[in-house]
Amino acid sequence: MELSLKNELLASFAWYTVIVVLKMMIMSIICVMHRIRNKAFVNEEDTKAFGSSVKGKLATVTNAAVERVRRCHLNDIENIIPFVIIGFAYILTDPAVETAIFHFQLFTGSRIAHTFCYLIPIPQPSRFVFCMSGYMATLSMAFRTLAALY
Amino acid sequence: MELSLKNELLASFAWYTVIVVLKMMIMSIICVMHRIRNKAFVNEEDTKAFGSSVKGKLATVTNAAVERVRRCHLNDIENIIPFVIIGFAYILTDPAVETAIFHFQLFTGSRIAHTFCYLIPIPQPSRFVFCMSGYMATLSMAFRTLAALY
Amino acid sequence: MELSLKNELLASFAWYTVIVVLKMMIMSIICVMHRIRNKAFVNEEDTKAFGSSVKGKLATVTNAAVERVRRCHLNDIENIIPFVIIGFAYILTDPAVETAIFHFQLFTGSRIAHTFCYLIPIPQPSRFVFCMSGYMATLSMAFRTLAALY
C-alpha cells in the first residue's frame, strides 16, 4: 500500500479526518466566545485583562453555557481521536473501499449531528443516538481490524 | 518500509493500539452505566429524559462513582494517545522487533492493570506503579526516536 | 512517498511531534509534583497513602496550583493532538519542505511559550497570542490539506 493521496482509501480517510478534527477545533472558538460574552474566565490573569461578570477582585466565574461547550469538546476528544487512530489501523487491513468510506461518513455525520444536539440543546435521546452511531462506527472498524490481524 | 500489515512491526503495533484504544472507549460505556444506575446526569435535557436521583425540577447530580470513571478516562487520554503517536514515530526508526513489541506489551498491560486499580479501587501505590510503568514505556520510545533522528 | 525517516518531511514531522508530545507528557509530572507538595489528592485511596493537607478522615483537596496545571494539560490535549493528526494528513499532500517545517516549528514554539505563560503565569494577552499562533498553524495545514484533496 502506497503512502500517498493517490490511494483512494487514504485520501478519503484524510478528508473525513480533517473535517471532523476541524469540527472539534471549532469547539475552542465557541468556548472562548461564550467566555468573552459572559465575562466568565477561570484564570485570575484573564479576569484582570478581560473583565469579570462578578464584582470583586479577580473573581473567576463558572458559566453554564461555557461548561456545556466544554463537555461537548471533551466528548469529541473521547470519540474523535479513537476514530482517527482505529480508522488508520483499519485502512492498513486493506478493506473494501465502499465499506470503509461508509464508516467514515457515518462517523463524521454522527459527530456533526451530535454537536448540534448538544449545543442547541435538542431533547434526548437525539444526542445519545448520534453519540452511539458514531461510537458503533469506530467499534465496527476496531473489530474488523482485530479480525484481520488475528 | 512498507505500509502494510505484512510488516510484522506495524501489525503488532496496530494490534496493541486497537486493544488499548478499545479499553479507553469502554470507559464511556462504564460511565454511562454509572450515570443511569445512579440517575446522575450533568445536562438538564438528560434529567428530563432519564430522571434524577435528587428531587426538584431538572436537578443535575454529581456522583462519586461517575467522577471516578471520568478521572480514569481522562488519565487514559493523557497516556494512551501519546503512546500511539510516539509509538508510530518510533516504528519509523526501524527498531528491533522484539524490543518494540516489549514496549507495546508493557504499555498495554500497564494500562489494563491501571484501570482495574483505579475502578475497584486497589490501595495505592499499585495504581501509581502501573501508571509509571506505562509512562516509562512511552518515554523510552520517545528518547529512542529522538536519538535515531538526531 | 516512502514511509521512512529518509524522507526529510516525515523525519522533521516525527521530530517536532515527539518534542511537543513529550512537552504534553511533562504536564503529568508537574501535576503530580504539585499534588504531593500540597498534599492535594482527589481519590480517597491517595490521601490514605500519601496524606492530606486538610484534617479529617480521607479528606480530598482541590488546590489552585494543581488545577492550573490540569487546565494547561487539557489545553495541550485540545491543541497538540489535532496538530499531530492534521500534520500527518498535510504531509500526505506532498507540501514544500520549507513551508511544512515552518508550520511545525511555529506550532512547537507556540506551545512551549504557551506553557510558560500559563504556568508562571504571565499576564494576558501573552497566553492568548501563543495559543492562537499554534491554532493558526494547525488551521493553515488543515485548509492546505482540504484544498489539495478537493
Image (cartoon, coloured by chain):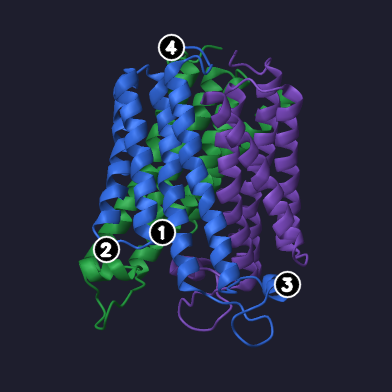
Chain colours: A purple, B blue, C green
Question: What's the mark number on residue B123?
Answer: 2
Mark 2 and mark 1: span between their CA atoms?
Answer: 24 Å
Query: Which residue is tagged 4?
Result: C6
**Pair 2/4: label in front:** 2
Please report the residue visible at 35 percent of the width from the left and 68 percent of the height from the top.
C42
User: Quarter of the image containing the N terminus of chain C?
Assistant: top right
Q: Are marks 4 and 3 on the same chain?
A: no
Query: Which residue is tagged 3?
Result: B49
- Which secondary structure lies at badge 1? helix
Pinpoint the chain carrying mark 4: C
Please report the residue visible at 47 percent of the width from the left and 15 percent of the height from the top.
B7
Tag 2–tag 1 contact (CB < 8 Å) = no
Query: Which residue is tagged 1?
Result: C70
10 Å neighbourhood of mark 3: few (<14), some, or many (≥20)? few
Which amino acid lies under the numbered mark 1 shown in the image of this protein? Answer: Arg
Count up the numbered dots. Answer: 4
Give percent across and percent down for residue B68.
43, 65
Pinpoint the chain carrying mark 1: C
Q: Are marks 2 and 4 on the same chain?
A: no
Above/below status of A27 relative to A106: below
**Pair 2/1: label in front:** 2
